[in-house]
Every structure is written in structure tokens, then in C-alpha cells.
């Protein structure tokens, strides 16, 4: 702002000088202007004016600076306080975030430890203690899927099939019917209770959600064999074999099934595969004898 004022004053002064020179222009060609008293006086006047302008400018600048200093101080204080509030807010958010994260980690570690203990107790057939641990888990997280699955294992071990089935049906709602292992467990329970058609339906549901698990196909093949549908049993067991060609349990089932349907060539093929992957299998001699008895 001060620079603009100075420029305006200089322009006005220049204009004033130009007017004087214009009036004296007719005489300039015939006289030495440098020696004229009027010119000397005018020059001195300009020097005085420029000095006065310089002093005025400096005084004005000093006054503006003096006036603006309190304003600048207030602005600096305002922004400093605002910055401090932002920093305090950032620290508070960080503190709360770290506290929540720490609580979440502690909760997760507690849940993991309880689930491990419950699983060990089920394996050791300490079912009541295992159930207590799982109830503790669900008090931390009422929607913990793993805790409910372990409860199902516990109920099945106790032959409490109704409780196991109810828990699985709740899990279906909890997982929006997208967990294939839940249908697989439902199928196993139906199979154990002799409800083979229900078992077939549930195994098929589990396969529709996950068709890369050989156990789903093998268990379904066993259901078809119990339903005396040998063709479907063979077809389904062969799909399990494609997924796990070196699995002794699948080979054992296929060899037995081929002996039942009296397909000697296929039985020999699967037996040779079993000898390769599990040469110490105690059933090999028995299988050889049964295959040899086939016409």
C-alpha cells in the first residue's frame, strides 16, 4: 500500500516538473538552463520535496507498522491457539484410537485363548468345562461363529443332536446361509440319525457353496451307497478322487464299491494306487483276496 502511495506522489511531482519545463521550453534553446537562478531554485525545491516525501513515507510506514503490530499479534495469537487446539484434538483422537485398539487386541487374545482351551477340553471329553469356556466366549462376542461351531461339536459328542441342529440353524442365519461347513455338519447329523434324504440335500447344499472339498463328495457318496444308489455313489466318489487322488480313505471306499458292483478292472486300478500311496495299509491283502474272487 505504501509503495503505491509513493509511486502516486512521484508521478504527481514529475507532472509538476513537466509543466514548468513546458512553460520555459521557448527559452531553453538560447540559454544555459543550468545557470538560471530559477532552475537552480526549482531543483533545490525538488530536492526538498523529494526529501520531504521520503520522510513522510517513512513516517507513514512507521505509523502503519505501529498500528498493525497489535493486529498482527492478535492474529498470531489466534492462529497459535487454533493450532494448539488442533494438536490437542489430534492427540486425543490418537489416544482414544490406541485405547480402543488395545481393548480390541486384548478381547481378541482372550477369545482366542478361550477357544483353544475349549477345543482341548472337547478333545479330552471334558464337555462341561468346555461348555463353560464357550459360554465365556459368547459373553465377549455373542456372534462368534467359531464358538458356536465348537458348541455343535460338543453337542454331537454328547449325542445331543437336537441342540446341535438348533445351533447350526442359528449359525445359518448368522452367516446368511453362505457357510458350506454348516450345511456339511447338518448333513452329518442327519446321516447319524438315519435321515438319509435330508443328509443328501444338505451335502448337496454344502457342495453348491464349495465344490472343492473332497470330504463333501465322499460323505455324499457314502449316503448314496446306503440309499443303494451305487451308480451315483461311484460317480460322486470319483469326483472326490479327482480332488484328492492320493487319499487312502477315498481309495478304500472306491475299492470296496468296485468289489460290490463287481468291476474287477476298476478295483485293480484303485488298489494299485493304494499300494503306491499307502503300501503299509492293512487292507491291501484283504482287497487282493476279494478282487481275486471276482469272476
Image (cartoon, rainbow, N blue to C red):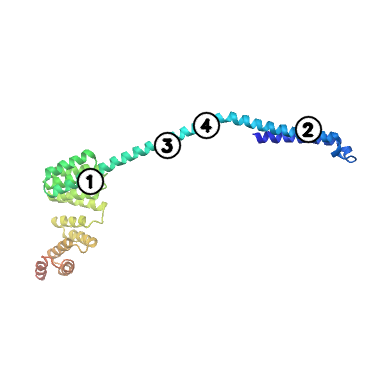
The residue singled out by tag 1 in the image is: 112
Residue 178: x and y, percent? Answer: 27, 47
Label 2 secondary element:
helix
> Which numbered disc flags the more N-terminal residue, 2 or 4?
2
Residue 111: x and y, percent? Answer: 22, 43
Q: Which one is closest to the eye, mark 2 or mark 3? A: 2
Residue at the spot x=55%, y=29% of the render? Answer: 70
Q: Is residue 217 above or below residue 277?
A: above
Q: Quadrant of residue 261?
A: bottom left
Spatial CA distance of label 1 from label 3 is: 37 Å
Spatial CA distance of label 4 from label 3 is: 18 Å
Instruction: Count residues near mark 3 (Cα–Cα under 10 Å), then give few for <14, some for 14-19, many for 20+.
Output: few
The residue singled out by tag 3 in the image is: 87
Q: Nearer the viewer, residue 207 or 230?
A: 207
Q: Is residue 209 above or below residue 89?
A: below
Instruction: Count residues near mark 1 (Cα–Cα under 10 Å), then give few for <14, some for 14-19, many for 20+.
Output: some
Label 1 secondary element:
helix
- The reply to whether callout 1 and callout 3 are in contact (CB within 8 Å) is no
The residue singled out by tag 2 in the image is: 45
Residue 171: x and y, percent? Answer: 22, 43
The residue singled out by tag 4 in the image is: 75
> Which numbered disc flags the more N-terminal residue, 1 or 2?
2
> Which numbered disc flags the more N-terminal residue, 4 or 3?
4
Amino acid at each position: 500500500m505504501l509503495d503505491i502511495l509513493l509511486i502516486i506522489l512521484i508521478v504527481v511531482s514529475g507532472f509538476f516538473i513537466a509543466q514548468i519545463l513546458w512553460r520555459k521550453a521557448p527559452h531553453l534553446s538560447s540559454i544555459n538552463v543550468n545557470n538560471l537562478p530559477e532552475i537552480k531554485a526549482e531543483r533545490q525545491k525538488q530536492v526538498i520535496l523529494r526529501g520531504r516525501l521520503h520522510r513522510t513515507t517513512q513516517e507513514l510506514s512507521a505509523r502503519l507498522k505501529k498500528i498493525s503490530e497489535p493486529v498482527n499479534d492478535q492474529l498470531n495469537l489466534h492462529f497459535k491457539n487454533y493450532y494448539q487446539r488442533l494438536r490437542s484434538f489430534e492427540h486425543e483422537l490418537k489416544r482414544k484410537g490406541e485405547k480402543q485398539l488395545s481393548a480390541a487386541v486384548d478381547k481378541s487374545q482372550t477369545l482366542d485363548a478361550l477357544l483353544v482351551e475349549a477345543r482341548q477340553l472337547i478333545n479330552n471329553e471334558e464337555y462341561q468345562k468346555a461348555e463353560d469356556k464357550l459360554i465365556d466366549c459368547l459373553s465377549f462376542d455373542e456372534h462368534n461363529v467359531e464358538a458356536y461351531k465348537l458348541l455343535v461339536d460338543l453337542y454331537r459328542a454328547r449325542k445331543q443332536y437336537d441342540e446341535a441342529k438348533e445351533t447350526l440353524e442359528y449359525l445359518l442365519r448368522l452367516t446368511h446361509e453362505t457357510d458350506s461347513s454348516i450345511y456339511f455338519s447338518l448333513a452329518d447329523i442327519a446321516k447319524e440319525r438315519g435321515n438319509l434324504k435330508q443328509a443328501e440335500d444338505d451335502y448337496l447344499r454344502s457342495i453348491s457353496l464349495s465344490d472343492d472339498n473332497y470330504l463333501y463328495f465322499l460323505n455324499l457318496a457314502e449316503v448314496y451307497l446306503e440309499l443303494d444308489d451305487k451308480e451315483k455313489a461311484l460317480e460322486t466318489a470319483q469326483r472326490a478322487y479327482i480332488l484328492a487322488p492320493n487319499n487312502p480313505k477315498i481309495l478304500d471306499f472306491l475299492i470296496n464299491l468296485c468289489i460290490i458292483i463287481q468291476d474287477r478292472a476298476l478295483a485293480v486300478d484303485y488298489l494299485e494306487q493304494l499300494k503306491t500311496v499307502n503300501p503299509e495299509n492293512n487292507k491291501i491283502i484283504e482287497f487282493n483276496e476279494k478282487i481275486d474272487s471276482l469272476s
